[in-house]
Image (tube, helix red, strand yellow):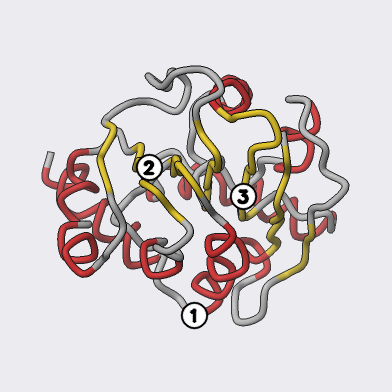
Amino acid sequence: MIWSKIIQPRLISLGCTSKPIRKQRSKVVPQAEGRVLEIGFGSGHNLPFYNDKKITNLIGLEPSVSMQKLSKKRLNDSKVNFEFLTASAEEIPIKTNSIDTVVCTYTLCSIPNPDIALSEISRVLKKDGKFLFTEHSKSPDVKVSKFQKRLAPIWKILGDGCHLTRDIRGILSDSGFNIDSTEDMYIPGTPKFIGYHVWGLIRK
């Protein structure tokens, strides 16, 4: 109980504050506009990167109440019109074709059924809506991917279901998203087993 509700959320939140991760957020989050839905809001690490002049309101989908509590200070410091949505990404309680931008950063790795979540993301997005994301992914290098596979069981426990071996591009492509505009690389200052990232802006 103490681990899952107090210690683990704080460890995950701390792990999301590194300079390389902040750099990745800065590449995608400022492009959000209109009515925005953030999948896996967590403790609010994306808040400083939103342009409040481009956003009418921000809905933070976050199933963990413990994570929601950790975001209090960042929300107090933000000018964004915000509301929490305590729900699962696999069943988003939002009307079809009602969201201008969906933001998803470091969340597809831990959603139990990412294919269902991506289907829901596609459903709630308006025609020509934006899907902005950055995620760590299975490495294309055989040696690194083998190490990821060995480390995966313990990593999944420590990271609250985080998968080191998910092929993000493959999942997106299988879900019908056009991945031609996505980018990838090992981000500097990060160990290779967690350093291979894929990111981009995909339009519905």
Q: Position of residue 153 (x, y in %)?
A: 51, 41
Tell me the amino acid under the disc marked 3: Leu
Q: Where is residue 68 in the image (x, y as percent from the top left)?
A: 21, 47
Residue position marked by numbered label 1 in the rendering: 19
Q: 10 Å neighbourhood of mark 3: few (<14), some, or many (≥20)? A: many
Q: As drawn, which residue projects farthest toward the right? A: 180
113 lies above or below 24 = above
Q: Distance between the residues labelled 2 and 1?
A: 22 Å
Quadrant (top left/top right/bottom left/bottom right) for the C terminus: top right
Tell me the amino acid under the disc marked 1: Lys
The residue shown at (52%, 18%) is: 96
Q: Where is residue 48 in the image (x, y as percent from the top left)?
A: 38, 70
Could you tell which of marks 2 and 1 lies nearer the N-terminus? 1
The residue shown at (11%, 46%) is: 2
12 lies above or below 83 = below
The residue shown at (44%, 40%) is: 37
Residue position marked by numbered label 3 in the rendering: 132
Q: How far apart are marks 3 and 1 (CA)?
A: 20 Å
Residue position marked by numbered label 2 in the rendering: 160
Quadrant (top left/top right/bottom left/bottom right) for the N terminus: top left
Could you tell which of marks 2 and 3 lies nearer the N-terminus? 3
* Left or right: 197 as drawn, with respect to 7: right
Q: As drawn, which residue projects farthest toward the left? A: 2
Q: 10 Å neighbourhood of mark 2: few (<14), some, or many (≥20)? A: some
Secondary element type, mark 1: helix
Query: What number of labels is visible?
Result: 3
97 lies above or below 47 = above
Could you tell which of marks 3 and 1 lies nearer the N-terminus? 1
Q: In which quarter of the image is residue 128?
A: top right
Label 3 or label 1, whichever lies nearer to me, is 3
Tell me the amino acid under the disc marked 2: Asp
Secondary element type, mark 2: loop
